[in-house]
Image: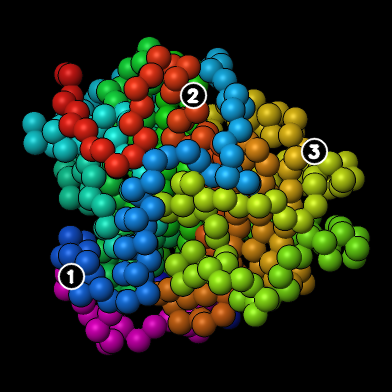
């Protein structure tokens, strides 16, 4: 990523974040400038600083011990929601791109990049800048041809618009690294990739691509694809200077969510708004935490019980239901077109059981959280307070979004028995996997 200095455009609304740029002389940022990603992570694990994040990390490790069953609304996994189907995914093309990447790897890299398809390490992705689980290869540590082949593989899997969204998230991450003088830890290519199973046009396999503010878990089988769980965030959510000036993400999810909430009657708004404040005194213990803030289904929350809140989409007008579909279209953007349309139809079929809820205000300038949740999809949107920037209250320039497929849909788990996998290991036991090439 280009290292030219950002343009000073603080007079623009999009540059509101600039009043919250941090003091780079404090130890947090001088350390980021001196240490590489591995040193930075080991120092965190050793000294537990900041304590709240280290405590959360230890809780994550405990959650990982639980066998996977998936996010539910009541603790009971609902069966037979997901079927093997033809989605027109060009698997031969994808496998060719994956094989090209693998052919460029050293023998040592090949040994480190492959895991058994049921290895619980698939669940160890996380979105902070700390490299807490180092799997596979990290793109800022490999030759440019390996990095290029990795990006070509992603381009072959994702929709064109989904790929551009991923690229934008990576570039904004690099921009943040420049803003805080921490590019050894955060840069455009500070992302890991690893495979679960071997790329195949006839057998199930998948991959994890993860790092700060972008985590994609992708399951593939014949002509079918699942991208879930995924996490996409940005702080700030716009680049206002340098080579990629004008890059912006997550504004469509924001726009449609607010449009939907503002379109509801005052009576329905009161039912949808489960908490009036972003950190509301009425929230029960655990409803807010430092890392996920209002999010419920982030990293390691594979088995979370999330009761339905708000109102059903089927109780909305047709115009409002169309806005819900616009929201879901944005959350399914990573999927190729045919897969996305089939998933949208499935979501629409469950509108009687799809709930919309809201936290915070709903004026044009208010930060907010919303969730769209059904038996087959859970999409969360949240404006956050500063992590690298210094805003203590949630602001519209720091956004976190994520998607889950409840009832075992994440990681393609519910499909695995239907793909010929009958001995899935769902947690706790690691397995060695040797590449067959």
Label 3: state its secondary structure: helix
Label 2: state its secondary structure: helix
Number of numbered discs on residues: 3
Q: Do residues under tags 1 and 3 come within 8 Å of each other at their CB atoms?
A: no
Task: Examine the residues drawn in magenta and state their main secondary structure.
Answer: helix
Q: Is residue 23 magenta?
A: yes
- Report, in whole angstroms, how far the alpha carbon at label 3 lies from the one at label 2: 24 Å
Residue 135, quarter of the rendered image: top left
Q: Residue at x 70, y 51 (%)?
A: 308
Residue 244, quarter of the rendered image: bottom left
Vertical placement of residue 144 versus 56, above or below: above
Q: Which residues are magenta?
A: 12-36
Q: Residues within 10 Å of mark 2 (few under 14, many from 20)?
A: many
The single residue placed furthest to the top in the displayed view is 202
Q: Which residue is mark 2?
A: 415
Q: Position of residue 424 (x, y in %)?
A: 36, 27
Res 46 label: 1
Q: Which residue is mark 3?
A: 352
């Amino acid at each position: 990523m280009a290292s030219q200095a950002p343009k000073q455009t603080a007079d623009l609304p999009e540059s509101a974040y600039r009043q919250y740029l941090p003091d780079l002389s404090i130890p947090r940022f001088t350390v980021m400038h001196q240490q590489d990603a591995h040193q930075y992570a080991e120092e965190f694990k050793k000294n537990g600083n900041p304590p709240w994040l280290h405590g959360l990390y230890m809780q994550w490790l405990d959650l990982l011990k639980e066998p996977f069953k998936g996010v539910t609304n009541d603790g009971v996994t609902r069966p037979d929601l997901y079927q093997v189907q033809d989605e027109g995914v060009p698997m031969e093309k994808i496998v060719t791109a994956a094989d090209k990447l693998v052919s460029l790897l050293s023998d040592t890299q090949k040994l480190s990049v492959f895991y058994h398809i049921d290895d619980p390490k698939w669940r160890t992705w996380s979105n902070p800048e700390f490299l807490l689980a180092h799997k596979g290869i990290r793109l800022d540590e490999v030759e440019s041809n390996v990095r290029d082949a990795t990006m070509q593989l992603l381009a072959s899997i994702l929709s064109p618009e989904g790929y551009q969204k991923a690229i934008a998230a990576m570039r904004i991450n690099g921009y943040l690294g420049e803003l805080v003088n921490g590019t050894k830890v955060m840069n455009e290519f500070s992302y890991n990739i690893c495979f679960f199973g071997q790329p195949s046009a006839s057998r199930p396999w998948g991959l994890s691509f993860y790092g700060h503010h972008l985590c994609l878990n992708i399951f593939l089988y014949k002509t079918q694809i699942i991208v879930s769980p995924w996490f996409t965030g940005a702080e700030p959510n716009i680049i206002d200077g340098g080579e990629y000036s004008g890059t912006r993400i997550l504004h469509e999810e924001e726009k449609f969510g607010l449009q939907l909430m503002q379109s509801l009657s005052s009576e329905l708004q009161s039912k949808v708004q489960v908490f009036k404040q972003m950190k509301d005194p009425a929230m029960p213990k655990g409803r807010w935490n430092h890392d996920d803030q209002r999010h419920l289904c982030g990293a390691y929350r594979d088995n979370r019980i999330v009761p339905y809140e708000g109102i059903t989409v089927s109780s909305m007008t047709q115009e409002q239901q169309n806005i819900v579909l616009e929201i879901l279209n944005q959350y399914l953007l990573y999927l190729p077109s045919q897969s996305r349309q089939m998933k949208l139809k499935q979501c629409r079929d469950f509108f009687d059981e799809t709930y919309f809820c809201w936290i915070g205000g709903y004026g044009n300038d208010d930060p907010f959280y919303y969730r769209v949740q059904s038996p087959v999809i859970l999409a969360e949107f949240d404006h956050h307070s500063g992590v690298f920037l210094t805003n203590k209250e949630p602001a519209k320039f720091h956004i976190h979004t994520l998607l889950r497929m409840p009832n075992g849909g994440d990681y393609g788990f519910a499909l695995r028995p239907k793909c010929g996998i009958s001995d899935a290991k769902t947690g706790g036991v690691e397995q060695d996997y040797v590449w067959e090439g």
